[in-house]
Amino acid sequence: MIKIGIICPSEIAFRRFLPALQNTGDKIEFTAIGIASPEEWFGNLTNVSQKAIDEQQSRERAKAQAFIDQFGGEIVVGYGNLVSSAKIDAAYIPLPPALHFQWAKKAFEAGKHVFVEKPSTTCLADTDKLIQIAKEKKLALYENYMFIYHSQLDALNEVVKSGEIGNVRLYRISFGFPLRQLNDFRYNKKLGGGALLDAGGYCMKYARYLLGDTAKVVTAQANNIDGFEVEMYGSVTMKNDKGEVAQIAFGMDNDYRCEIEIWGSKGTITSNRILTAPAGFTPTYTIKKNQEFEIRELPADDAFLKSIQRFVACVESDEIKNEEYSILHTQESFVEQFKELANI
């Protein structure tokens, strides 16, 4: 039994991670949730009032209590106290991206496996450092791009392989969503915000699935909007050694879109929940042949559950650990290629 603790009472942990965890059987168990200590939250406390400290602790404890009330476990004050606790074997890290490296490293130093929300870190150098530490300590380092395990991806791939739409001429992947509240970490550069890490990474991950091992980034564009310190939308072209191309568009001040379009010589496939289908939702795709359209169902699935199961397998198997190290390095390499080409 893997005992896992959660660093911070985040929305995704409550809404997606723990409900999926309840369906994993006896392989993994939620044990504790950590809330930031005053020092971890504010840094130097010299100029911080006791009232501010009390409010922060009260607010975070109330969030964490909702986890305990619904899922059990206990509250631990201090992320550092959580990752060093003998009560856990692994840490789930759903913090803002800029904090991932720090707390994953501390978890490894305490001998814990790490399940981290995407992106693993904010740069390839930091990700590679974590991979090296994990290898040395024989610990799991797993990045949670859960959509990649949804069976709709393989189902669409089988349609393509069948030849029904002929030879693929182009893949188009789009992922964007409207503005959130302006205090959201996604708009904060110091916290690792920006559309590339929050949305673009999804698209490049899927493009790698479609294009295979020789995929690479060949063009990249990042766009800013007045009033924001991070890139708000962008585009990418990726290709493989066969000359197959994926055109990618992403953003976080956009009309909502989460689509794959596969344009073939005899037909076109489109599907509009390719990266975000929740558990139990039955996706569909449209197949168009000239001016004839047909809507077909895709399988429902629980991608988050499958992602947790992959993490468990990663903990249990050195071979899978090594596979995940390689997958993680490749993913962050794409992000780094984008940054270099887009000059960000």
Image (spheres, grey):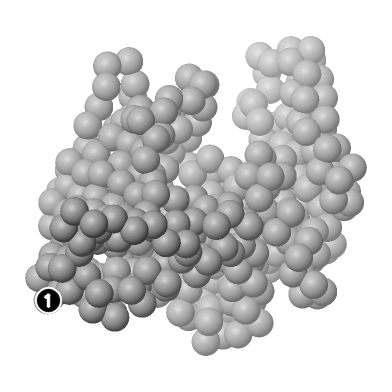
Give the structural element (helix, strand or loop) at label 1: loop
Disc 1 crowd, CA 10 A, few/some/many (<14, 14-19, 20+):
few
148 vs 223, left or right, is: right
Q: Answer yes or no: is residue 6 visible.
A: yes
- Whole-percent x and y of residue 186? 45, 33
Residue that appears at 66% across and 39% down: 11
On the image, which quarter does residue 31 sit in?
Answer: bottom right
User: Is residue 91 positioned above or below 329 on the image?
Assistant: above
- Report the amino acid beneath label 1: Lys
- Whole-percent x and y of residue 21? 73, 61
Give the residue at mark 1: 242
User: Is residue 214 positioned above or below 91 on the image?
Assistant: below
User: Is residue 54 positioned above or below 209 on the image?
Assistant: above
- Whole-percent x and y of residue 41? 66, 30
Locate the N terminus by quadrant: bottom right
Q: Which residue appears farthest toward the left when viewing the image?
A: 243
On the image, which quarter does residue 60 sit in?
Answer: top right
Residue that appears at 29% across and 80% down: 162
Locate the C terminus by quadrant: top left
Task: Out of 153 and 295, give the one closest to the viewer.
Answer: 295
319 vs 21, left or right, is: left
